Image: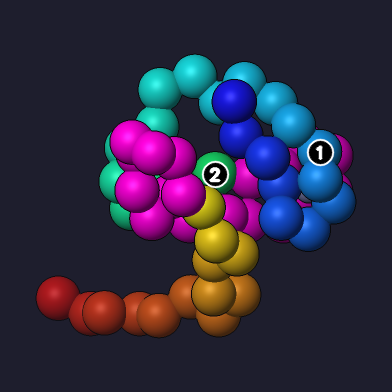
Amino acid sequence: MVVCPECDGTWNSGEVVKGEIITCPDCGVELEVLNVEPLQIAPAPEEEEDWGE
Ligand SMILES: [Zn+2]
């Protein structure tokens, strides 16, 4: 179960992995998975970094 820090919506994300970006189905905010057990999420940075190759 994921609880959105933005809208307090909850949903079942299924399997997530650390570092994954998930999107709240309620408000659409992007959330980064900081840790899996226990589950910790935080709003992902809005700007996408281009790391190049
Ligand atoms: Zn939300």
Q: Residue furthest front?
A: 38
Decide: few, some or many residues near mark 1? Use Cα within 10 Å; few <14, some 14-19, many ≥20.
few
Q: Quadrant of the N terminus?
A: top right
**Stretch in magenta:** 23-40
Where does the C terminus fall, quadrant-wise?
A: bottom left
- Confirm whether the magenta stretch covers residue 34: yes
Residue 23 image point, x, y percent? 64, 45
Amino acid at pointer 1 = Gly
* Up-down relation of residue 29 to residue 14 (above or below): below
- Residue displayed at 26% across by 79% down: 51
35 inside magenta stretch: yes
Separation of residues labelled 2 and 1 (CA atoms): 13 Å
Q: Is mark 1 within 8 Å of ligand 1?
A: yes
Q: Between disc 2 and disc 1, whose residue precedes? A: 1
Query: Residue, x 71% and y 47% (percent of image)?
Result: 4
Residue at 57%, 55% in the rendered image: 31
Q: Is residue 40 visible?
A: yes
Give the vertical position of 1 relative to 27 (above or below). Answer: above
2 lies above or below 47:
above
Which one is in front in this view, the residue at disc 2 or the one at disc 1?
Answer: 1
Residue type, numbered disc 2: Ile
Query: Residue 42's quadrant in the figure?
Result: bottom right
Is residue 21 in sight in this rendering? no
Q: Position of residue 50 (x, y in %)?
A: 35, 80
Residue 48: image x %, image y %?
Answer: 48, 75
Residue carrying label 1: 9
- Residue situated in front as seen by the camera: 20 or 34: 34
From the viewer's perspective, tell me whether residue 1 is left or right of residue 3: left
Residue 22 marker: 2
